[in-house]
Image (spheres, rainbow, N blue to C red):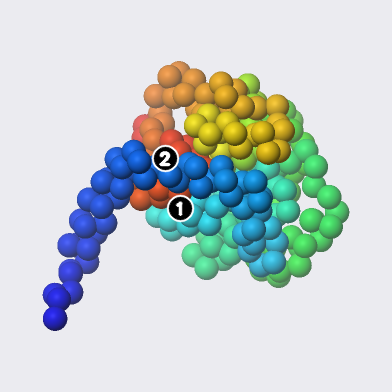
Amino acid sequence: MSKLLTREEFEALRLQSAEAMSADVELRRKVFELIVSADRYYWIHQTSWFGEPVLQLAQDMFALQEIVFKTRPKFIIELGVAWGGSLLFYSTLMEGLGGGHIVGVDTYIPEHVKQKLNSFGKISDRIALIKGSSTDETTFGLVKSLVGDTREVLVILDSFHTHDHVLKELRLYSQLIGVGHYLVCCDTHVEHIPEIVENRPRPWGLGNNPKTARDAFLKENGRFEVDQVLENKLLMTLHPGGYLRCCKE
């Protein structure tokens, strides 16, 4: 009978295996090919939470769950609402952990989405919606007024993915985040696999996307670093290099 590992041994094995997996160039190439192929069938549209679509890979949602559990933010701010499934996901986590509130920002929030988001009792009570451009000073001011003085904030950038727009978001919303908390720059994979955009034409692509914005941001802002330990274990992610942790004031 094989010996059951201690928790410490198991965690060491996980870290070692994740590092080796992340370094496997051929495996990562295959994963990129899978993401491109599956995108032709709108794979990322297939995940739901409480019946509402979540336009993310389940693996990335689990990574966000780990961040929320570890950091216990008082606010989660998501730029880009879509169908609202991800807002419900974060609010469910907050309800279970006894955490704070969720703020969703978008230029277009249809009435039927609002109605759905308001139909889940205590989970819905944690969600606030702001209609407006995420980079507009008025919108940012409204977000800041909700957050108040706390720096225990998680921000997820998942709205308009051009370089200029995402860089503005990074510069603005990074101000809200304190040491140990996260700024997640979504869809950095576009730089690695721009074929994704060919399936659903967008004004972003190779050289003009969240990754290029993230690179520019990290060069000018020394407060954030990529959480490589978290990323090593994901393998299948739409946000490579996008999980940014605040490491200094």
**Crowdedness near tag 1: few (<14), some (14–19) or many (≥20) residues, C-alpha within 10 Å:** some
Relative to 167, say whether 10 is above or below: below
Along the line of sight, the residue nearer the viewer: 18 or 131: 18
- Residue at 66% x, 51% y is 41
Task: Determine whether 18 is above or below 126 in the image.
Answer: above
Badge 1 amino acid: Ala
Residue shown at the point (49%, 65%) measured from the top left? 97
Q: Nearer the viewer, mark 2 or mark 1?
A: 2
How many other residues sit within 10 Å of disc 2, few (<14), some (14-19) or many (≥20)? few
- The image quarter containing residue 95 is bottom right
93, above or below 149, in the image: below
Quadrant in which the N terminus is drawn:
bottom left
Position in image of residue 46 (x %, y %): 64, 58
Rendered location of residue 117, percent (x, y)? 74, 60
Secondary structure, mark 1, is helix
Q: Nearer the viewer, residue 224 or 240?
A: 240
Residue 240, given in percent of the width and then of the height, sits at 45, 38
Q: Residue at x 58, y 49 (%)?
A: 38
| Residue 109 can be seen, yes or no | yes
**Taking the image as drawn, is residue 179 in sight?**
no
Toward the right, the furthest residue is 111
Q: Earlier in the sequence, mark 2 or mark 1?
A: 2
Badge 2 is on which residue? Answer: 29
Residue to which mark 1 is pinned: 63
Q: Give the side of residue 152 with respect to residue 24, left or right.
A: right
Label 2 and label 1: CA atoms lie apart by 21 Å
Q: Name the spot of residue 156 as percent of width and height, x first.
A: 57, 42
Dot 2: what SS? helix
**Which residue type carries mark 2?**
Arg
**Residue at 58 percent of width and 31 percent of height:** 194
